[in-house]
Every structure is written in structure tokens, then in C-alpha cells.
Image: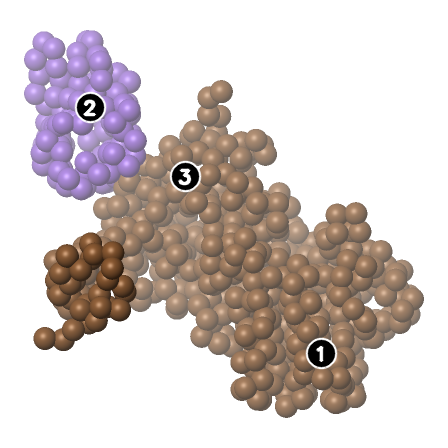
């Protein structure tokens, strides 16, 4: 759990669940946090989901899948915030503007 | 009408892979490419046998050679290439070049070289950070799918993006057309027959295609004749003549024709009688569609003899030769036939020989390949200037020579551009260099010569070009 907490964190309010990701979101890392992520999503209760990528400098296909899952579960459009340029480019090329708000 | 689920899924995955690929640096890419090259080369024999068995074309040993070319020689050609980030900087011009990937590529694979073309296209696509979707010929789906599996697993072991290589085989024709036209696709790399290349160019997606060949081979009087005949046999029997760049017609200077015939006969080439030519035409050529009969492609001499009812052909004949008087649809063997069959002509002058080669070249082979055996460089140049061929091969076997990397310094490729004559965009041997968008940083470097010209001069109608040019080039 301690290992996963360094890679993913959460901020919550009545309206929003913000998932804060840390470091490289490569295949290994996303596998490590998968359970924590899904367990937290299960407590969503109709709130909006926000992904905070301030500390993320790389995303693999497995992380893009997290985005797709979140876009289907949350209220309204998934918001992805504090995006580094290289990661923003990835999200744009992957066509994620159709499923998420990139801020 | 919406996009089909199969096409949507395939392109969605390819776009995600393209996106992830943009984050990879040169070192990561080169590790992936090396892993895929190694895997492909390691499985060269099994894939060759699969291809031969599934398609019923060619010889598995020669398909091994094709797989070796498609991995070892292609890798050798591309391994040092800079394909990521800044690839050149010139402080004098102030221009810096940056290599950007294209995006998802659809690769059409021909039945003649299924595993080798797949290996080749995967390597050049990965080297340039482009996800690739392989669409195999319907008669070669198993061997193509297996090639994709081997390459993909090798790529993933080096952390390549998921879905960087996909195999598209479940689609209907309509779905394939839909895939080709989808705006998410960056490029179609079409190697195959006329209809598939035409479909690619008609799709509104940028495409690099190929053209048909009808390769004239001129044996000029200064040629080393035994050597020339050896090279021609090496080429034309290679994989039972399935390479589009293989010789289709020999044009011989009549002064040396006796020796040429002797050398051919010594090597068990069979000169067909007029009656035998007529029988061969019925199986080698589809008169209605005016193309070679697909059933003859890559068949052995023995197989062809059986198909045509040629009962007097020696069992060990290496090639079948048809001596013809002209070129055209009325003489089917003067057309491209991808099998161990050659048309044969004698010419009593250099001009007549070159005229025949032009006729053959323009009879369905514009832009592809021409071949000459000669030791007279002036005649080689004269010949080349008159051929409409992307590659004019000198003293080399045409099949292997056109592919490049073994008998010359052409880059190794299984996609040979034929230029506008073949309705292609290039005459190059297509390689990784063609799969990049080159971006340029252009720093300020003012052309001071423009400043020499007074604007009043430019707006004065009475002042002609001369004074303006003089002002431009004035050195002070």
C-alpha cells in the first residue's frame, strides 16, 4: 500500500474525486496502482473525476486505458489537469479531447 | 453510416500507440528495432517455409534469402539512421531538422513476398516511431499473421507501445476500404498488384505505392557473356521469378547472339518452338484482362510445362525462353510474367536493341527497372538515359539487384517506387527515410542581396530583368 501511495493519491470533495498521479505512468507502474485506482473508483457515487498529472512526465498505453475507464465512470467529462507538454501531445494524438477536457 | 467496429477499434489502438511512441527517444527505438530484427532473422526459415506452403509460390530456400534481406540488410541500412528528435543542425544556414513520425501506417502485403515484405515494413515503421497495421494478401494470411506475432512479441519485450504492430485480417473488402479512407490513418504503404495500389491512391489518405515491371535486359557486345548469363539465371530462377524486378526479356546484340545462345543452352535453358510458345501463352496470359495469369506466378518450369501440356520439355530445364519478333498484347510473352519464362530478341544494331528495350519498358513496366550487361560506360549511360526506369542495373542479377544492398549500394527495400510513369510519387527504393515528417527550425539569415535592389526599380515597368538581376548580384 505504501508503495502505491507514492504513485497515486486522491483528493476528494462532495462533487469531485481527484486522482493525483506521480512519475512515469508506464506499464509496470500502472499495474501496481491498478487495484487502488479501481477500488477508489468504486466509491465514486456519481461525482466528477479529475486526473492531476502535474508530476507525470510519461504515459503508456495502460495509463490511457485508465483515462478511458474514468471517462465512462464519472459525472460529465473527465478533466485532466496540470498536463506537461509532452504528455499533452500524447493525449491529443490519441484523440482524447473527445473524451476528456484537457486543462 | 458509422465506422465499422473493427476499423474503429484498429485505428483507436493505432492512434494510442502513435501517441505513446512520440515519447520514445532514439535509444529506446533502436533497442526495439534491434529486437525485432533479431527475432525476424531467427525465424527466417520457419517463416519462409510457411510462406511457400501457404501461397504455393516460389521456393522456400529463396524465401529464406528474402527474409534475410528483409531483416539483416534492411537493419544494416537503417540502424545508424537518426529518426528521432534533432537529426541535423547547420549553423551556417541556420536550419535544424527534426524527425517527426507520420502516425499510423497501413501496410499492404503482396502474395509474392509475404513474410519478407512484412518484416521489412515493420522494421522501417518501428524505426520511425510509426505504428503499423499489416494487411496480408488473402492467400498469405497465416504466414503474415505469424510474422506479425513474432515481431510484436519481440517489440513488447523492449517496452514498445501496445498495438504498435497490428494484423488486420478479419475485415471485408468494404472494411478495408473504410480503413484506407479513415482520417486517422497517416499513410498507406501499398505493395501489390495494380488494383490494390489504385485503391490506396483513390482513398484520400497519402499513399506510397509501386508499379508493375516489365524488365528489359540488354546484353551489349562488350559484356562478359558467361558471367551475364550466370547472373540472369541467378535472378530469373530466384524464387521461381516472383520478384517484380526480375528480367522479363533478353535483348541481344546479334554479333554475340551465337555465344549467348550457347551459354544459355549450356545452362539448360529451353528455347521454345513456335508451337510450344502458343501452348504456353494459353496458361501464362489472361487475354481478356491483358495481364499474366495469376496461376502461373512463382511456378516451377516443370509445373508450367505440366499446366501448358508441354510434354517435350526436358525435366531439368532451368528456364523457358520464347524468341519473339515484336512487343505488344498480341505477343503475350512480351508482357510481365512472374515465372521462369523469358522473352528473347536479337537486334542487329545498338539503336534497334535500345528501341526494343524501350518498347518492352513501355509495355507495362514504366518506371520500374531496366538491366544492362556491358563494359562500355558510354553505352551504359546512353541506355540509361533512354529507359524510363527508377533503377538501371549494370552487370547484376535484376531481382536481387533492384532490391538493393547485395549487388549495389541501393538501400534494401521491398517497395520499389516507379515514379509518375507507374503512378507513384517516387522512383526510390522506399525505406525508413520516407516514413518521416521532417520539421525545420529556420533561424533568421537575411538574404542581403535582396536589399541591393531599390524598390523603385521593381515598381518601374520600364526596367527589364537585366538591371534588376545585376543589382541583385552586385558584390559590394
Residue positioned 22% across, 65% down in the render = B468
Categorize mark 3 by other alpha carbons within 10 Å: few (<14), some (14-19), many (20+): many
Can you tell which quarter of the image residue B20 is in? Answer: top left
Horizontal and vertical percent for residue B26? 25, 57
In the structure shown, which secondary structural element does the residue marked by tag 2 occupy?
strand
Horizontal and vertical percent for residue B446? 13, 61
Categorize mark 1 by other alpha carbons within 10 Å: few (<14), some (14-19), many (20+): some
**Are the two marked residues, 1 and 3, in contact with CB atoms closer than 8 angstroms?**
no
Q: Which chain is purple?
A: A
Q: Is residue B315 above or below residue A84?
A: below
Residue positioned 45% across, 75% down in the render = B409
Q: Which chain letter goes with mark 2?
A: A
For marks 1 and 2, give the one nearer the viewer.
1
| Left or right: residue B263 compared with residue B120 | right
Q: Which residue is mark 1?
A: B352
Categorize mark 2 by other alpha carbons within 10 Å: few (<14), some (14-19), many (20+): some
Distance from disc 1 to disc 2, alpha carbons, whole Å, reads 71 Å
Please identify the residue farthest to the front as the structure is shown: B462
Which numbered dot is residue B185?
Answer: 3
Q: Which chain letter goes with mark 1?
A: B
Q: Which residue is mark 2?
A: A101
Q: Is residue B108 above or below residue B52?
A: above
Q: Which chain letter goes with mark 3?
A: B
Tags 1 and 3 both on a single chain: yes
Horizontal and vertical percent for residue B244? 61, 61
Amino acid at each position: 500500500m505504501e508503495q502505491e501511495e507514492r504513485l497515486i493519491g486522491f483528493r476528494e470533495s462532495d462533487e469531485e474525486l481527484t486522482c493525483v498521479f506521480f512519475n512515469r505512468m508506464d506499464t509496470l507502474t500502472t499495474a501496481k496502482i491498478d487495484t487502488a485506482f479501481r477500488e477508489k473508483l468504486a466509491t465514486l457515487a456519481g461525482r466528477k473525476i479529475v486526473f492531476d498529472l502535474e508530476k507525470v512526465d510519461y504515459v503508456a498505453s495502460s495509463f490511457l486505458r485508465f483515462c478511458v475507464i474514468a471517462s465512462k465512470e464519472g459525472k460529465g467529462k473527465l478533466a485532466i489537469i496540470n498536463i506537461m507538454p509532452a504528455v499533452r501531445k500524447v493525449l491529443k494524438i490519441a484523440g482524447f479531447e473527445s473524451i476528456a477536457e484537457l486543462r | 453510416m458509422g465506422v465499422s467496429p473493427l476499423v474503429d477499434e484498429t485505428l483507436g489502438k493505432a492512434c494510442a500507440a502513435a501517441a505513446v511512441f512520440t515519447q520514445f527517444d532514439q535509444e529506446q527505438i533502436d533497442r526495439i528495432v534491434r529486437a525485432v530484427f533479431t527475432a525476424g532473422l531467427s525465424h527466417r526459415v520457419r517463416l519462409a517455409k510457411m510462406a511457400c506452403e501457404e501461397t504455393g509460390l516460389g521456393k522456400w530456400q529463396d524465401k529464406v534469402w528474402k527474409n534475410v534481406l528483409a531483416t539483416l540488410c534492411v537493419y544494416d541500412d537503417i540502424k545508424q539512421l537518426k529518426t528521432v528528435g534533432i537529426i541535423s543542425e547547420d549553423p551556417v544556414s541556420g536550419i535544424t531538422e527534426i524527425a517527426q513520425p507520420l502516425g499510423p501506417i497501413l501496410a499492404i502485403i503482396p502474395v509474392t513476398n509475404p513474410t519478407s515484405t512484412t518484416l521489412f515494413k515493420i522494421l522501417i515503421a518501428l524505426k520511425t516511431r510509426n505504428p503499423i497495421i499489416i494487411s496480408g494478401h488473402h492467400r498469405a494470411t497465416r504466414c503474415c499473421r505469424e510474422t506479425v506475432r513474432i515481431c510484436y512479441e519481440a517489440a513488447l519485450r523492449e517496452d514498445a507501445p501496445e498495438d504498435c504492430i497490428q494484423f488486420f485480417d478479419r475485415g471485408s473488402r468494404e472494411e478495408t476500404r473504410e480503413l484506407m479512407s479513415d482520417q486517422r490513418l497517416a499513410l498507406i504503404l501499398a505493395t501489390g498488384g495494380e488494383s490494390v495500389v489504385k485503391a490506396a491512391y483513390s482513398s484520400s489518405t497519402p499513399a506510397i505505392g509501386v508499379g508493375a515491371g516489365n524488365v528489359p535486359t540488354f546484353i551489349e557486345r562488350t559484356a562478359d557473356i558467361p558471367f551475364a548469363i550466370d547472373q540472369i539465371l541467378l535472378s530469373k530462377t530466384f524464387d521461381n521469378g516472383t520478384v517484380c524486378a526480375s528480367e522479363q526479356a533478353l535483348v541481344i546484340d546479334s554479333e554475340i547472339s551465337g555465344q549467348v545462345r550457347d551459354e544459355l543452352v549450356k545452362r539448360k535453358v529451353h528455347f521454345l518452338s513456335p508451337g510450344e510458345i502458343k501452348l504456353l501463352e494459353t496458361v501464362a496470359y489472361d487475354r481478356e484482362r491483358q495481364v499474366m495469369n495469376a496461376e502461373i506466378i512463382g511456378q516451377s518450369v516443370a509445373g508450367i510445362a505440366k499446366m501448358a501440356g508441354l510434354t517435350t520439355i526436358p525435366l531439368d530445364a532451368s528456364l523457358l525462353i520464347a524468341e519473339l519478333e515484336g512487343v505488344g498484347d498480341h505477343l503475350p510473352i512480351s508482357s510481365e510474367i512472374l515465372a521462369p519464362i523469358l522473352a528473347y530478341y536479337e537486334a542487329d544494331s545498338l539503336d534497334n536493341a535500345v528501341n526494343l528495350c524501350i518498347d518492352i519498358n513501355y509495355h507495362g513496366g514504366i518506371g520500374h527497372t531496366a538491366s544492362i550487361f556491358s563494359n562500355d560506360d558510354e553505352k551504359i549511360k546512353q541506355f540509361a538515359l533512354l529507359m524510363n526506369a527508377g533503377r538501371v542495373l549494370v552487370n547484376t542479377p535484376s531481382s536481387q539487384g533492384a532490391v538493393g544492398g547485395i549487388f549495389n549500394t541501393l538501400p534494401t527495400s521491398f517497395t520499389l517506387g516507379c515514379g509518375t510513369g507507374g503512378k507513384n510519387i517516387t522512383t526510390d527504393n522506399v525505406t525508413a527515410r520516407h516514413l518521416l515528417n521532417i520539421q525545420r527550425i529556420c533561424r533568421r539569415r537575411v538574404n542581403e542581396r535582396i536589399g541591393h535592389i531599390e524598390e523603385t526599380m521593381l515598381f518601374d515597368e520600364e526596367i527589364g530583368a537585366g538591371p534588376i538581376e545585376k543589382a541583385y548580384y552586385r558584390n559590394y
